[in-house]
């Protein structure tokens, strides 16, 4: 006897049912669960059972992963990028590997490497399983931060069945659990918990995340990287490949030095030879190759390692009518000599500029381009072309003809466009027939004529199908409504009584053209967008092709699917077509194959028709059904024999860009093709030769082609907003075109007299602020062309030095705001730290170019040669108190001391740290240097001997970001990502007291008060805290008000004020001498720093009222929301800029009257 139950049934009900139904049974099973009845004692065991189908359905519903995510297809051309691909394949099978970071600037081919390495990984079947390749694309769902982790879970569950069942049980136990609704950290904790995953496997499992810089923002990226590192350290079998631009801060993450191996595409892997191969491959097919070949080496040099430059230049050369002329334009580009504004993309930008100038010579086109680009630059989210056209005030809009169709008698052509209209054209005169057919409210993607030519059906982004009378131009009846998303394809039944439509809502719908009603229920089964529908010749069936990689056949009478889905394609299906006898369906796909299907059996006929090397956009049967033509992104048309599955002859080559549409002539002797190269070409199907010259005239991509019924003409619709009719005999255009379609602050520094603060920012300016008024002094100090990392005041306060990502140091006069002299140029990468010498005559700068440079502030000249020795980025520089030496700390794990007179390194590097050094500081007597590192230690170094003094100061459990000496030199304070400040005795090397705790996130900066009694710390938790170095206790409440991370803190010389610089682009000054008041309320004791009238201790409640505590509480003031933050904490005495959130508030209570004395206001006014 067997019983069945649903895994989702309540366990209690299941148990009761089992006991009642099966009390007399023994040795029976319930789908894998055994119940043995021995005598009268029953032992009931129930195990939830998930078959593969139900498990996948559960995970899809609960995890909501991205099922059909973006699939990039560009691979590394054969013979290129061999070294990096080999290195990655060696890395992935190394037992110690965890995370590979492949990084390079835009244009270095990161995504192509990701696609190619995925293919290589799949070939390592015995040692590796590739679980997921995830391409992050800005504006697509793969950039949604809530969907990456669930998608990883879903694909890992496909690899590990036990893991999938564990997830399903978790969801069953917590039915309300919503994976996509959880924060990223919670997603990992709940679903990517190592406890749920196997500890050991027989193969490594790899996940590729491509383009991480296009996923979320920096904060989310930082969190994800740390979570991935932590996961990889716990799962020995996991391999993660990340590709991104260098700006993604992988190296800043905790334990990155342990888990991450970098693959630098600019420094480690030189691409010149690969780019040379790409250029030769792209250009040698051109007719002018003999003239082009001698210049390939020059083009390679100009590409400067950027595949994007090479691809763009070759596309420009090959797309124009004058290939040699276009080559000369590219060769005429001069290399940028503007080193002061150096940019690694300078040559690429120059190329773009030249191509744009060549492409937009017409003044109207230029104006339209400016309007469109202007809008795109200011919108915060991706917008559709329709929304874009609505935003263009002039009424100009991108008018793209999406689809054309001939009338059955060949006398007219219908076109559907992004301008929301259908238009009918007379093929003899080229004139528009009547007015545009208006009614749709969004783009039209598809049009089809009825068999008698009296009506046209159109499908649109507005989710409706509309029927139009071609004689009157009027809409027939109401729109056919029912689809819940864009409609991509419409087709008439052979008798004209019905229209089929396929949509993004994953359904096909059949419509009665007489009544306008939907016939039956939607045809449901596809799991993704439907791109193409076609009627069988007898009208009894409809075929549909979808993003879900299947073709489905539907019975138009019953609405049921006929047989199983036609499966075999491995990517989206773009086009389906019936054979003339209705016995077969052809389909073309992104998987680069055409497949023929038997409509009776549902089986694939023979092998896939393989040969195309890129996506196939269009397929068409020959009139006799013996051949299928296909057009592809690989720029070829191919003819296939439907009986043998073999390609007939050679590919039809000639197009220089993607082919969007193919159509057979009525007699089957010719095929027309339309392409992104702006031409229509006619091909002889017998010889494979092009007939005559390309049909030229369109000025933009051609989306659709169609033959007239007599075969004498071809109509083409283009992105250039026109339909054109072509004479197939002469190749000439018939008549005229058918027209009518319509940031953060990185560094702050006080002036020596405390009256001003300088700040350097990502907005490329240095600004001087008056600390008394909070106002900016003069204009911003402008000149830098990129983010500013560090600023320093000269000892006399008259100048500010700043170091920037633009690779320059600039000196500015704080009185006039003018730059003093020229920029100090010489560094070849970002400058991270600047420091003035004690006498103010020199500035030292440390850079990502691995050098320290000394500059003469009077002449602006570099003093001597660069101080070379570090092998990677320099993070911090500091002058010794006597100015004779500079200390530098680097990511190469060393501190180096430099003699500023000779430029020589003093002694050997100070080695001992095991990873990057984040901060260095000189002791007040100059005899020692302290350094803080990501290896979680502080080390003290003797500057005379170069030896480490004592043992490392250990105790921190995460990276150390800042170190500072106490004024007497006896102690060092350190701030860390472990959220603590620690005080160290420099004599004994011991930690003084307990860690100073309170911060809830990483600590970026620490500073001693001038008397050494307190340490101020700034943190990612947006607070500054003051800690008593004697007791280890926090002094008062945290200084709050900043709305972002606090990067730097500094004490004023009189120790009464603390300044903080934050990611919210503010500098705030707080008074440390104001004492906390204690207010007793009905809820208990409330500690408050609120502004209060004399003799009162007030606090601000949640409703914004300032009032006194206690049972007889007095309401003092109701505070508008914008001043509550500053009013609640009067320790903050200054905010720069003064209009920032939670700005400082000054209150004069001298003439304030409240309570029963309010009438005295009247007496005061009378006097």
Image (tube, rainbow, N blue to C red):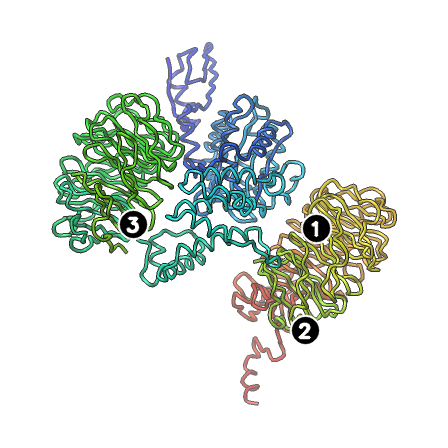
Query: Which part of the image, by quadrant, shows the N terminus?
Result: top left
> Are the residues tagged 2 and 1 within 8 Å (C-beta)?
no
**Circle count:** 3
SS category of the residue bearing label 2: loop
| Residue at which label 3 appears | 697
| Residue at which label 2 appears | 815
Residue nearest the viewer, comparing 1009 with 1109 = 1009
**Image vertical order of residue 44 relative to residue 1084, above or below:** above
What residue is at 55 percent from the left and 71 percent from the top? Answer: 1117
> Are the residues tagged 1 and 3 within 8 Å (C-beta)?
no
Eye-nearest disc, 3 or 2: 3
Q: Position of residue 448 (x, y in %)?
A: 21, 42
Eye-nearest disc, 1 or 3: 3
Q: Position of residue 1162 (x, y in %)?
A: 54, 85
Seen as rendered, the residue at the extreme bottom is: 1167
Among the 4 quarters of the image, the one containing residue 576: top left
Q: Real-space Cα distance between discs 3 and 2?
A: 63 Å
Residue nearest the viewer, comparing 1047 with 19 = 1047
Could you tell which of marks 1 and 3 lies nearer the N-terminus? Answer: 3
Categorize mark 1 by other alpha carbons within 10 Å: few (<14), some (14-19), many (20+). many
SS category of the residue bearing label 3: loop
Q: Real-space Cα distance between discs 2 and 1?
A: 30 Å
Categorize mark 2 by other alpha carbons within 10 Å: few (<14), some (14-19), many (20+). few
The label number, if any, that marks residue 875 in the structure image: 1
Among the 4 quarters of the image, the one containing residue 20: top left
**Image vertical order of residue 89 relative to residue 1037, above or below:** above
Q: Position of residue 527 (x, y in %)?
A: 35, 34
């Amino acid at each position: 006897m067997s019983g069945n139950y649903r895994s989702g049934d309540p366990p209690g009900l299941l148990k009761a049912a089992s006991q009642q139904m099966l009390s007399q049974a023994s040795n029976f099973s319930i789908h894998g669960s055994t119940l043995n009845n021995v005598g009268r004692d029953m032992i009931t065991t129930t195990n939830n059972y998930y078959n593969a189908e139900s498990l996948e359905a559960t995970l899809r519903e609960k995890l909501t992963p991205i099922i059909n995510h973006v699939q990039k297809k560009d691979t590394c051309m054969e013979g290129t990028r061999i070294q990096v691909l080999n290195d990655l394949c060696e890395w992935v099978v190394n037992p110690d590997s965890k995370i590979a970071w492949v990084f390079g600037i835009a244009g270095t081919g990161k995504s192509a490497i990701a696609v190619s390495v995925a293919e290589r990984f799949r070939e390592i079947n015995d040692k590796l399983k590739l679980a997921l390749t995830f391409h992050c694309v800005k504006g697509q769902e793969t950039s949604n931060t809530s969907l990456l982790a669930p998608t990883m879970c879903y694909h890992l569950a496909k690899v590990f069945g036990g893991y999938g069942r564990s997830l399903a049980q978790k969801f069953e136990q917590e039915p309300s659990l919503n994976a996509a609704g959880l924060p990223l950290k919670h997603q990992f904790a709940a679903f990517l918990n190592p406890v749920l995953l196997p500890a050991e496997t027989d193969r490594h499992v790899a996940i590729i995340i491509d383009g991480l810089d296009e996923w979320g923002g920096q904060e989310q990226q930082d969190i994800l990287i740390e979570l991935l590192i932590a996961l990889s350290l716990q799962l020995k079998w996991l391999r993660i490949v990340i590709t991104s631009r260098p700006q993604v801060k992988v190296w800043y993450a905790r334990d990155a030095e342990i888990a991450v191996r970098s693959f630098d595409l600019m420094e480690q892997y030189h691409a010149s030879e690969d780019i040379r191969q790409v250029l030769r491959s792209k250009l040698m097919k051109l007719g002018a190759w003999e003239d082009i070949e001698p210049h390939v080496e020059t083009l390679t040099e100009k590409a400067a390692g950027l595949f994007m430059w090479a691809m763009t230049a070759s596309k420009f050369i090959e797309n124009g009518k004058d290939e040699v002329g276009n080559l000369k334009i590219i060769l005429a580009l001069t290399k940028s000599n503007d080193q002061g504004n150096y940019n690694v993309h300078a040559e690429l930008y120059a190329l773009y500029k030249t191509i744009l100038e060549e492409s937009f010579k017409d003044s109207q086109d230029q104006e339209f381009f400016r309007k469109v680009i202007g809008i795109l630059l200011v919108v915060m989210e991706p917008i559709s072309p329709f929304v874009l056209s609505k935003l263009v005030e002039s009424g100009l809009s991108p008018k793209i003809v999406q689809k054309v169709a001939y009338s059955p008698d060949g006398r007219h052509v219908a076109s559907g466009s992004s301008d929301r209209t259908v238009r009918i054209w007379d093929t003899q005169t080229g004139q528009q027939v009547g007015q545009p057919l208006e009614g749709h409210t969004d783009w039209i993607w598809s049009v089809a004529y009825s068999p008698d030519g009296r009506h046209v059906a159109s499908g649109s982004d507005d989710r409706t199908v509309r029927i139009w009378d071609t004689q009157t131009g009027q809409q027939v009846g109401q729109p056919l409504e029912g689809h819940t998303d864009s409609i991509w394809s419409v087709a008439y039944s052979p008798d004209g009584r019905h229209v089929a439509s396929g949509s993004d809502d994953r359904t096909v719908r059949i419509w009665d053209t007489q009544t306008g009603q939907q016939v039956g229920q939607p045809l449901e089964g596809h799991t993704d967008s439907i791109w193409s529908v076609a009627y069988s010749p007898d009208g009894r069936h409809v075929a549909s092709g979808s993003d879900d990689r299947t073709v489905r056949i539907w019975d138009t009478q019953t609405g049921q699917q006929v047989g199983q889905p036609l499966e075999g394609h491995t990517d989206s299906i773009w086009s389906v077509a019936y054979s003339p006898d209705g016995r077969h369906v052809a389909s073309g796909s992104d998987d680069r194959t055409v497949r023929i299907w038997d409509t009776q059996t549902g089986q694939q006929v023979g092998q896939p028709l393989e040969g195309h090397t890129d996506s196939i956009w269009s397929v068409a049967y020959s009139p006799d059904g013996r051949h299928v033509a296909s057009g592809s992104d690989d720029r070829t048309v191919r003819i296939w024999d439907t009986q043998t599955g073999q390609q007939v002859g050679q590919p039809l080559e000639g197009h220089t860009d993607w082919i969007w549409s193919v159509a057979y002539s009525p007699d089957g002797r010719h095929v027309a093709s339309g392409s992104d190269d702006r031409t229509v070409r006619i091909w002889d199907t017998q010889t494979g030769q092009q007939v005559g010259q390309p049909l030229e005239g369109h000025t933009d991509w051609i989306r659709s082609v169609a033959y007239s019924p007599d075969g004498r003409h071809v109509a083409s619709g283009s992105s250039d907003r026109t339909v054109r009719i072509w004479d197939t005999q002469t190749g000439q255009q018939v008549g005229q075109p058918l027209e009518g379609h319509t940031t953060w602050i990185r560094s702050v520094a006080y002036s020596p007299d405390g009256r001003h603060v300088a700040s350097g920012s990502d907005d490329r300016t240095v600004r001087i602020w008056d600390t008394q008024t909070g106002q900016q002094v003069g204009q911003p100090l402008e000149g830098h062309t990129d983010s500013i990392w560090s600023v320093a005041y000269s000892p006399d306060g008259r100048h500010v030095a700043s170091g920037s990502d633009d690779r320059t140091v600039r000196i500015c006069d704080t009185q006039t705001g003018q730059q003093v002299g020229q920029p100090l140029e010489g560094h070849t990468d970002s400058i991270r730290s600047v420091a003035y010498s004690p006498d103010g005559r020199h500035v030292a700068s440390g850079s990502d170019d691995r050098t320290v440079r000394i500059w003469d502030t009077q002449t602006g000249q570099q003093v001597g040669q660069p101080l070379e020795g570090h092998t990677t980025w320099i993070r911090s520089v500091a002058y010794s108190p006597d100015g004779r030496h500079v200390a530098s700390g680097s990511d190469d794990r060393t501190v180096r001391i430099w003699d500023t007179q000779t430029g020589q390194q003093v002694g050997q590097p100070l080695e001992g740290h095991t990873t990057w050094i984040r901060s260095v500081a000189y002791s007040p007597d100059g005899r020692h240097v302290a350094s803080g590192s990501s290896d979680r230690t502080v080390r003290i170094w003797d500057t005379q001997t170069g030896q480490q003094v004592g043992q490392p100061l250990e105790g921190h459990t995460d990276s150390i970001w800042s170190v500072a000496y106490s004024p007497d030199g006896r102690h060092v304070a350190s701030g860390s990502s472990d959220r603590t400040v620690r005080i160290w005795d420099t004599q004994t090397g011991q930690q003084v007291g307990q860690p100073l705790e309170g911060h809830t996130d990483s600590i970026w900066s620490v500073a001693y008060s001038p008397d050494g009694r307190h340490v101020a710390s700034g943190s990612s938790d947006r607070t500054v805290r003051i800690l008593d170095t004697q007791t280890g206790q926090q002094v008062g409440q945290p200084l709050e008000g900043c709305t972002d991370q606090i990067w730097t803190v500094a004490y004023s010389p009189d120790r009464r004020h603390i300044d903080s610089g934050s990611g919210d682009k503010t500098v705030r000054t707080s008074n440390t001498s104001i004492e906390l008041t204690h207010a007793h309320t009905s809820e208990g004791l409330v500690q408050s720093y609120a502004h209060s009238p004399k003799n009162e201790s007030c606090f601000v409640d949640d409703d914004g009222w300032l009032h006194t505590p206690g049972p007889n509480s007095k309401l003092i003031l109701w505070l508008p929301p914008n001043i509550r933050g500053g009013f609640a904490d009067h320790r903050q005495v200054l905010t720069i800029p003064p209009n920032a959130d939670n700005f400082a508030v000054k209150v004069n209570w001298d003439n304030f009257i409240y309570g029963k004395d309010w009438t005295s206001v009247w007496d005061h006014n009378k006097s």
